[in-house]
């Protein structure tokens, strides 16, 4: 069970999280968010959250595992029009907000481009941003956030036991998921505001949390497995990666 009033009490936001749609059990919070948008039932900054996500979607067509009543699966709905150049920074906004949240709860996370949150090289969170674009602006976006909060090693399926971890494993005690959700949403709103006024701060903060600057990275881009040396993030949120001696640019999100 997630208590939405506990999320609201802990929010320090002007707009984000004022409306919360809670479901005991749901296929995917991202899919439900799109359904609400299509039905005209969504508001800007609305949170869609569930206690048990059964068909969580990950990046690149992967699935996202959530342990019932232990993990956090939520989606934030963005309904303000955003120029495409700025929209490329939103996955980084979400990544920095998530890393700051885990730091606030006593962890020492690092960010792995494009969207992974790690503790000592093991994944504790991921972000899936989906958008609807019209002309040169994004009209609506769903920012889906999955965080392993209170899982112990035995909660993860065998194939994830070596590569996944949780905030609780890292910190040695359990955490109130509502508080984690509220802190994330509060940081997200702060960085959302920076998108207008000082986008360079987002890049700076992301860079200082990144765990692989100047190191070798492997990633999937449009179905292709690539590897190279991670150089930096540019002002549009694109990663500069040296592949076979040549600088190449990759967006953190494919807008469509
Ligand atoms: C990844 O690392 O591959 C991204 C994982 C994103 C998972 C979250 S959980 C909440 C939201 N709803 C989904 O179906 N996926 C995202």
Image (tube, helix red, strand yellow):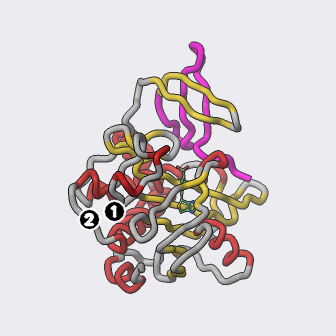
Q: Residue at label 2?
A: 174
Q: Residues within 10 Å of mark 2 (few under 14, many from 20)?
A: some
Q: Residue tagged by mark 1?
A: 150
Residue 109 position within the rendered picture, expressed as x and y whole percent measured from the top left: 32, 47
> Magenta stretch containing residue 238, yes or no?
yes
Q: Are marks 2 and 1 in contact (CB under 8 Å)?
A: yes
Relative image position of residue 77 (x, y in whole percent): 58, 70
Q: Quadrant of residue 163?
A: top left
- Provide the secondary structure element on which disc 2 rests: loop
**Is residue 231 found left or right of 7 in the rendered image?**
right
Does residue 166 appear left or right of residue 92 in this picture? left
Closest to the observer: 175 or 7?
Answer: 175
Asked whether 49 or 252 is in front, the reply is 49
| Whole-number angstrom distance, CA of label 2 to CA of label 1 | 6 Å
| Range of magenta residues | 231-256
Residue lying at 46% horizontally and 46% vertically, measured from the top left: 158
Outermost residue, bottom side: 5
Q: Position of residue 12 (x, y in %)?
A: 34, 75
Residue at 57% x, 33% y: name it: 219
* Picture quarter with the N terminus: bottom left
Judged from the image, the secondary structure of the residue bearing numbered disc 1 is: loop
Magenta run includes residue 226: no
Where is residue 191? Give x, y as percent: 43, 59
Confirm whether residue 204 shows in the render.
Answer: no
The image quadrant that residue 154 belongs to is bottom left
Cβ of mark 1 under 8 Å from ligand 1: the answer is: no
Q: Quadrant of residue 206?
A: top left
């Amino acid at each position: 069970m997630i208590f939405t009033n506990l999320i609201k009490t802990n929010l320090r936001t002007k707009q984000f999280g004022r409306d919360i749609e809670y479901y005991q059990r749901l296929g995917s919070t991202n899919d439900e968010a799109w359904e609400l948008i299509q039905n005209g039932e969504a508001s800007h900054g609305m949170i869609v959250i569930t206690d048990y996500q059964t068909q969580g979607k990950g990046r690149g067509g992967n699935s996202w595992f959530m342990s019932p009543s232990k993990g956090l699966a939520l989606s934030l709905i963005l309904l303000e029009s955003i120029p495409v150049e700025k929209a490329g920074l939103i996955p980084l906004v979400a990544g920095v907000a998530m890393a700051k949240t885990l730091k606030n709860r006593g962890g020492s996370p690092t960010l792995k481009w494009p969207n992974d949150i790690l503790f000592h090289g093991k994944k504790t969170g991921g972000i899936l941003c989906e958008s609807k674009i019209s002309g040169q602006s994004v009209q609506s976006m769903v920012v889906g956030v999955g965080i392993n909060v209170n899982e112990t090693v035995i909660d993860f399926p065998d194939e994830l036991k070596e590569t996944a971890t949780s905030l609780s494993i890292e910190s040695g005690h359990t955490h109130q998921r509502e508080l984690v959700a509220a802190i994330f949403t509060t940081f997200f709103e702060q960085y959302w505001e920076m998108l207008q006024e000082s986008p360079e701060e987002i890049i700076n903060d992301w860079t200082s949390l990144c765990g692989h600057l100047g190191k070798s990275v492997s990633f999937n881009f449009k179905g292709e497995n690539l590897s190279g040396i991670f150089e930096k993030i540019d002002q549009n949120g694109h990663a500069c990666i040296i592949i076979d001696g040549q600088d190449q640019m990759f967006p953190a999100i494919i807008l469509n």
